[in-house]
């Protein structure tokens, strides 16, 4: 029987790449996002995929999505929490800006994990949280709010791994660096000022290049496989050597 994987924020970018990789590897893929058109477009490009639309910053929608998955597909083997946003959806006040960042980068993962864990325990499943190097050390020009929320996510993965481990659930995080894909912030930077952007990469990234979504999806697939059965509570950086923390 095929394993079922729910990938949040999977209609484009890194999430779409992860979904495509799992599909190509024989998994049944459940796509998630807020935009129906983007989800349908993604589904049409990914074999054996299904859609569960919803805003995961809201507990009730998370509960509904997981209930639908269990009703339709009977089980859940893998959860990939990919939702993240470096720009707030709400900027009415400083408080609302912080809440928006936390909703997109922290609670969107925590909510769906809480709703999923009893089903993942039954399948001895895996959870992957897509974080950022901004949550590991100070990155120039990164919004403070974004960095704080990704740091919180990294801490959560480390701290919750013990209780989830007692239920035979693995949880790890992947912290990407500068990843290029269509529509990404790096595409916009290259269009805006190619020379400045390339100089930044040359000066700050030892490998002197941008990463691509496949760098993330390959690692994600490995961490959810039986080959990684002794890895949990870890945060893996995929950044071309940019971060310097030991």
Image (spheres, rainbow, N blue to C red):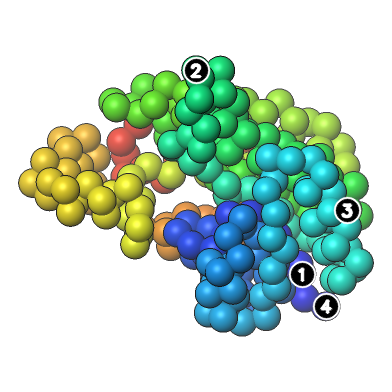
Q: CA distance from mark 1 to mark 4?
A: 7 Å
Question: Sequence-wise, which precedes: disc 4 or disc 2?
Answer: 4
Q: CA distance from mark 2 to mark 1?
A: 43 Å
Residue corresponding to mark 4? 1
Question: Sequence-wise, which precedes: disc 2 or disc 1?
Answer: 1
Q: Secondary structure at mark 3?
A: helix
Residue drawn 58% across the image and 49% down it: 82
Residue drawn 69% across the image and 68% down it: 51
Q: Is residue 196 above or below residue 219?
A: above
Residue drawn 53% across the image and 43% down it: 84
Q: Nearer the viewer, residue 4 or 181?
A: 181
Residue corresponding to mark 1? 3
Q: Nearer the viewer, residue 131 or 115?
A: 115
Q: Nearer the viewer, residue 156 or 219?
A: 156
Q: Are marks 4 and 2 in contact (CB under 8 Å)?
A: no
Q: CA distance from mark 3 to mark 4?
A: 16 Å
Residue drawn 67% across the image and 34% down it: 107
Disc marking residue 119? 3
Q: Secondary structure at mark 2?
A: helix
Q: Are marks 2 and 1 in contact (CB under 8 Å)?
A: no
Residue mark closest to the camera, 4 vs 2: 2
Crowd rating for badge 3 (residues with CA inside 10 Å; few <14, some 14–19, many 20+): some
Visible in this render: residue 150? no
Q: CA distance from mark 1 to mark 3?
A: 13 Å
Q: Are marks 3 and 4 in contact (CB under 8 Å)?
A: no
Instruction: Tell me where residue 222 appears, x and y as whole percent.
Output: 59, 59
């Amino acid at each position: 029987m095929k394993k079922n994987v729910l990938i949040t924020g999977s209609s484009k970018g890194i999430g779409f790449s992860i979904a495509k990789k799992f599909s190509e590897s024989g998994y049944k893929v459940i796509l998630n996002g807020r935009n129906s058109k983007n989800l349908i477009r993604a589904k049409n490009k990914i074999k054996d995929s299904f859609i569960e639309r919803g805003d995961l910053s809201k507990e009730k929608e998370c509960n509904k999505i997981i209930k639908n998955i269990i009703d339709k597909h009977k089980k859940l083997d893998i959860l990939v929490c990919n939702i993240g946003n470096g720009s707030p959806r709400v900027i009415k006040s400083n408080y609302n800006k912080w809440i928006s960042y936390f909703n997109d980068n922290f609670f969107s993962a925590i909510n769906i994990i809480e709703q999923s864990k009893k089903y993942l325990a039954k399948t001895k499943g895996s959870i992957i949280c897509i974080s950022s190097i901004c949550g590991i050390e100070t990155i120039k020009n990164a919004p403070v709010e974004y960095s704080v929320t990704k740091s919180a996510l990294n801490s959560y993965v480390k701290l919750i791994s013990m209780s989830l481990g007692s239920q035979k659930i693995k949880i790890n995080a992947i912290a990407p660096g500068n990843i290029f894909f269509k529509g990404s912030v790096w595409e916009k930077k290259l269009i805006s000022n190619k020379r400045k952007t390339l100089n930044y990469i040359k000066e700050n990234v030892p490998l002197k290049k941008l990463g691509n979504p496949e760098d993330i999806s390959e690692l994600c697939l490995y961490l959810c496989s039986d080959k990684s059965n002794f890895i949990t509570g870890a945060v893996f950086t995929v950044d071309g050597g940019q971060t310097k923390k030991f």
